[in-house]
């Protein structure tokens, strides 16, 4: 089988586009963030459809106006948020497998539901691997995001690959409009007074504009009387309560330790609901007992 | 002193002690962490540590009783790992220790006194966190305790040696930060092209040796990981 190097040229991109794989599991002991995908299920779905390895790298796109040109034939798969996707200027299905021919141009226009899109390619993108992962992060990889003009390597067979069974499974995007996020009590949950616990679980919260790949801050403040804690482990999905009463939900590039009380932990399956929310959108927490 | 076990959903379990596990107690935390990693190696994704805690990230969590039974019995095991001592060169020149003068003024201490106190202690590496390669060190002389800046600096250069609250630390990467920079080391604290990307491990001792500006310049031209003493 031919397996030649080729490139995908980035013709346009907003900030925050980056290469992602499952991240740097095992390196937290050296202070290295996990840097997996923000929406793990969307990432897994692409690699599943493409019959890739589960760790094969994809593009994580979080702004409209993304344009990429594939120089040689391959198969790609799109999942996550729903957008106006075009191939060579023609509207296409915004999720699922897509055949790519020489010099095809894929464009991600308006993002209509959700905020993060995954673009997977057959055999995965072949960018530099640092500490066993291609996920881009400041201080680890040479560049921390994808920029216009970048050429991202991938493999081609010089023809569109045939899969044994072309999966027709539809991407279930219902979670993009889900408002309930299931959470477990965090290690410091019991330090909150019962009225504050009740308030927190009864109230809707809005996503603020303070959102990046490390954390998302919620708009509403919580009266906080818990002091800081001795630096302790945190994970993607840990919700911290800052001294000013702000709630910070940590995401995939979060530090591995923190000094704010960890009041809640988002259930792994529901972290994507939070990660896909845009500033201004709301959510509620549903406490699940341990 | 038995630790408390808190289960946080099906994927995380935190083991926490009521006091900071530093000094002689750090050995206990490290022993427990190593024993857990060994015993449950097939069901663990990774463990993370803090001053009072170990948190286990499970691939597949065993029965709660299995873990608590194991923890009870591991308290008696005392297999002792070997720890290293590292001498780290630090230049306390005012051009590198950008906040040293201000710290000496607010604390009414001589600059040389601050340098002496900072470089005569031995610091214990408790765990890594905050940034890749950032060491949480205990052992700062209480005379050097200094509140963090109310407004953090936008960028502190990699290699900066700083104090904040009752802690001292080295910025392994350029980063915003609220600590007071009192010197700079030519020794790299994090190298993503090395695996592991750091040279010391929890339990090791770190000492700072004052060097001149000329020595700093010479050593920073060829930054290398240090060798243990």
Image (cartoon, coloured by chain):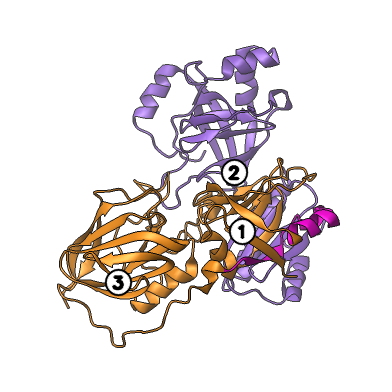
Chain colours: A orange, B purple
Frontmost residue, B75 versus A90: A90
Q: Chain of mark 1?
A: A
Task: Answer with mark 1 or mark 3, whichever residue precedes in sequence.
Answer: 3
* Chain part drawn in magenta: A178-201
Left or right: A242 in relation to A102: right
Mark closer to the observer (3, 2): 3
Frontmost residue, A188 versus B136: A188
Q: Is residue B75 above or below residue A168?
A: above
Q: Chain of mark 2?
A: B
The Cα atoms of the two marked residues, 1 and 3, are separated by 30 Å
Mark closer to the observer (2, 1): 1
The residue to which callout 1 is attached is A282
Residue A26, position as x, y percentages in the image? 51, 60
Sort mark 1 into few (<14), some (14-19) or many (20+) by Cα contacts within 10 Å. some
Name the residue: 58% across, 36% down: B206
Name the residue: 34% across, 28% down: B221
Frontmost residue, A61 versus B181: A61
Residue B105, position as x, y percentages in the image? 65, 12
Discs 1 and 3 share one subunit: yes
Asked whether residue A247 appears in the rendered view, the answer is yes
Image mark for residue B204? 2
The residue to which callout 3 is attached is A92
Residue A126, position as x, y percentages in the image? 29, 61
Frontmost residue, B109 versus B175: B175
Q: Which quarter of the picture shows residue A5?
A: bottom left
Q: Is residue B87 above or below residue B26?
A: above
The Cα atoms of the two marked residues, 3 and 2, are separated by 58 Å
The Cα atoms of the two marked residues, 2 and 1, are separated by 47 Å
Sort mark 3 into few (<14), some (14-19) or many (20+) by Cα contacts within 10 Å. some
What secondary structure is marked by label 2? loop
What secondary structure is marked by label 1? strand
């Amino acid at each position: 089988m031919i397996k030649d190097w080729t490139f995908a040229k980035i013709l346009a991109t907003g900030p925050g586009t980056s290469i992602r794989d499952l991240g740097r599991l095992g390196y937290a002991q050296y202070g290295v963030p996990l840097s997996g995908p923000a929406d793990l299920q969307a990432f897994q779905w692409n690699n599943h459809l493409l019959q890739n390895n589960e760790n094969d790298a994809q593009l994580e796109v979080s702004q409209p106006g993304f344009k990429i040109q594939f120089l040689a034939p391959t198969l790609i798969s799109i999942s996550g948020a729903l957008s106006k996707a075009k191939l060579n200027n023609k509207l296409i299905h915004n999720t699922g497998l897509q055949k790519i021919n020489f010099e095809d141009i894929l464009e991600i226009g308006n993002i209509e539901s959700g905020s993060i899109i995954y673009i997977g390619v057959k055999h995965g993108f072949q960018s530099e691997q640092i500490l066993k992962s291609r996920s881009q992060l400041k201080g680890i990889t040479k560049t921390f995001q994808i920029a216009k003009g970048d050429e991202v390597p991938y493999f081609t067979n010089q023809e569109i690959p045939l899969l044994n069974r072309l999966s027709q499974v539809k991407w279930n995007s219902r979670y993009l409009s889900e408002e309930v996020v299931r959470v477990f009590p965090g290690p410091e949950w019991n330090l909150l007074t019962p009225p504050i616990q009740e308030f927190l679980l009864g109230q809707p919260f809005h996503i603020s504009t303070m959102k990046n790949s490390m954390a998302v801050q919620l708009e509403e403040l919580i009266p906080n009387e818990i002091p800081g804690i001795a630096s302790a482990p945190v994970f993607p999905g840990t919700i911290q309560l800052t001294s000013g009463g702000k709630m910070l939900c940590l995401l995939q590039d979060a530090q591995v330790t923190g000094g704010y009380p960890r009041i809640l932990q988002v259930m792994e399956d529901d972290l994507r609901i939070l990660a896909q929310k845009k500033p201004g959108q709301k959510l509620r927490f549903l406490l699940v007992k341990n | 002193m038995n630790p408390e076990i808190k289960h946080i959903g099906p994927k995380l379990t935190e083991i926490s002690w009521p006091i900071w596990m530093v000094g002689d107690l750090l050995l206990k935390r490290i022993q427990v962490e190593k024993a857990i990693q060994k015993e449950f190696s097939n069901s663990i994704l990774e463990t993370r540590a803090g001053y009072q805690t170990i948190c286990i990230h499970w691939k597949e969590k065993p029965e709660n009783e299995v873990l608590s039974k194991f923890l009870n019995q591991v308290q008696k095991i005392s297999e002792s790992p070997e720890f290293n001592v590292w001498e780290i060169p630090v230049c306390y020149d005012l051009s590198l220790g950008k906040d040293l003068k201000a710290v000496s003024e607010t604390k009414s201490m001589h600059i040389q006194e601050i340098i002496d106190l900072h470089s005569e202690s031995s610091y214990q590496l408790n765990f890594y966190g905050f940034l890749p390669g950032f060491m949480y060190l205990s052992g700062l002389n209480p005379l050097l305790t200094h509140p963090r800046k109310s407004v953090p600096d936008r960028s502190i250069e990699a290699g900066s040696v700083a104090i904040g609250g009752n802690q001292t630390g080295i910025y392994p990467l350029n980063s915003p930060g609220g600590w007071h920079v009192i010197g700079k080391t030519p020794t790299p604290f994090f190298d993503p092209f090395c695996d592991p990307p750091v040279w010391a491990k929890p339990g090791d001792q770190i000492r700072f040796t004052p060097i001149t500006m000329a020595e700093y310049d010479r050593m920073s031209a060829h930054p290398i990981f240090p060798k243990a003493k």
